Amino acid sequence: MKRVFVSAAIAGAMFAAGAATVPATAQPGWNSNAFWRGAPGGQWERISFLQQRIDRGIADGSLNRREGMRARAELRRIRFDAQRLRARGGGR
């Protein structure tokens, strides 16, 4: 009997873990068009737009300090890659 309960618990944990790994694009509330609403079309303008969103998120508390630092670091890498592409003649 104990083995049945343990097996059921393991099966339940596996099911819950599988549900938690659904990609963000498959979540019912996600709308990629809403995310970019109001964003400019150029790559440098979009980088600036994202920097403003990150700063606003930190200021209003929707991003905590760690999330803000991580987002800024990622945007810094994107900016660096864009500058490198521009220097090679592949960016605008």
Image (cartoon, helix red, strand yellow):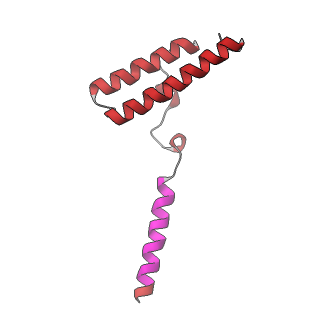
- Name the main secondary structure of what is drawn in magenta: helix
Residue 50 rendering spot, x and y as whole percentages: 46, 21
Lateral position of residue 60 relative to residue 76, left or right: left
Lateral position of residue 15 relative to residue 2, left or right: right
Residue 49 rendering spot, x and y as whole percentages: 46, 16
Give the residue drawn at x 44%, y 39%. 29
Q: Which residues lie in the magenta part? A: 4-20
Q: Quick check: 77 above or below 47?
A: below
Residue 78 rendering spot, x and y as whole percentages: 55, 24
> Could you tell me if residue 38 is visible in this image?
no
Residue 16, image quadrant = bottom left
Residue 61, image quadrant = top left
Q: Is residue 13 magenta?
A: yes
Q: Residue furthest bottom?
A: 1
Residue nearest the observer in this picture, 88 or 23: 88
Q: Is residue 73 magenta?
A: no
> Could you tell me if residue 59 is visible in this image?
yes
Quarter of the figure that contains the C terminus: top right
Q: Quick check: 60 above or below 48?
A: below
Q: Quick check: 7 above or below 71?
A: below
Residue nearest the observer in this picture, 12 or 68: 68
Give the residue drawn at x 60%, y 18%. 82
Q: Residue furthest right?
A: 89
Residue 20 rendering spot, x and y as whole percentages: 47, 54
Give the residue drawn at x 45%, y 77%. 8
Quarter of the figure that contains the N terminus: bottom left
Give the residue drawn at x 45%, y 69%. 12
